[in-house]
Structure formats: C-alpha cells, structure tokens
Image: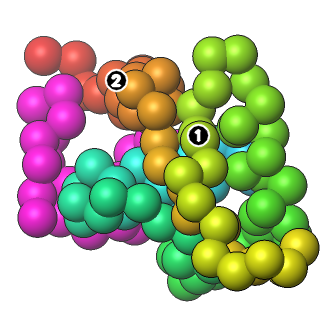
Amino acid sequence: MAIPVHGRTFLDFPELFDDANPQTSVDRALVAAYWFQVHEGAEDWDSQTVNTALKHLGHQSSNVTRDLDALIGRTPRFVIQVRKDGSTRQARKRYKLTREGTKAVEQMLSATAPLS
C-alpha cells in the first residue's frame, strides 16, 4: 500500500528508508517499524520482523531489542510494548509505534523532502 508522506509516495521499504536517511541503529529500527505499522497496516510487529527488513538493506542491528528498549525509554515514548507471547524471558514481544514515534519518522522524511 502506497501512502503519501509530505507529497511523496513510497512504494517499498528501501525507498522510504533511503529518504528518511536514519543515522543510528535506534533510528533505523524506528523507520522500519514505521514502514510495517503505517505503510503495511500492521496493528503491531515484533523485533525480528524489523531486524529482518534492516538486514535485507545491509543495516541489521546487533541488538534490535536494545534499540527498541531505547525507543520505549524515550520521553515521550516512540514505541510501546503491547504484549508478550509466552512466559519466558526470551518470549516474543509485540510492539507498536506511538503517535510521537510516527511524527519522529515523518520529521526525518520532511527534512529530506525536496523544496517545492
């Protein structure tokens, strides 16, 4: 699903990622999460999905859970954990972007938008 952002339409994740130009592993995870939640319409997503998308672009995180924890720890929060499947420490967690997380990615995209 192509959704216009700041007058531009992104047909795939690599194009959105390139335009956002995230500089840190935390920001790269944020942009990938944005793709799955906003563009793909996922209600929530897991860290493996985000890291696999980054891996395909050559930007795999060395610890994507740590990156997501950093986004959860920000004030305001950019990501929230919505559930945990299983009872072990290694159980798969599900996450969701907050409104502030969505705005942060859209600000990255607006910073790279061509001048009209």
Using the rendered image of the protein, determine whether residue 24 is visible from the camera's viewpoint.
Answer: no
Tell me, yes or no, whether the highlighted magenta stretch contains residue 11: yes
Nearer the observer, disc 2 or disc 1? Answer: 1
The residue wearing badge 2 is 110
Residue 35 on image: x %, y % = 36, 57
Tell me, yes or no, whether the highlighted magenta stretch contains residue 87: no
Give the residue type that dot 2 points to: Ser
Q: Which residues are magenta?
A: 1-23
Q: Secondary structure at mark 2?
A: helix
**80 over 66 or under it: above or below:** above
Residue 79: image tag = 1
The answer to which image quadrant residue 107 occupies is top left
The answer to which image quadrant residue 37 occupies is bottom left
Q: Is residue 8 left or right of residue 55?
A: left
Q: Residue at x 13, y 16 (%)?
A: 116
Q: Residue at x 59, y 41 (%)?
A: 80
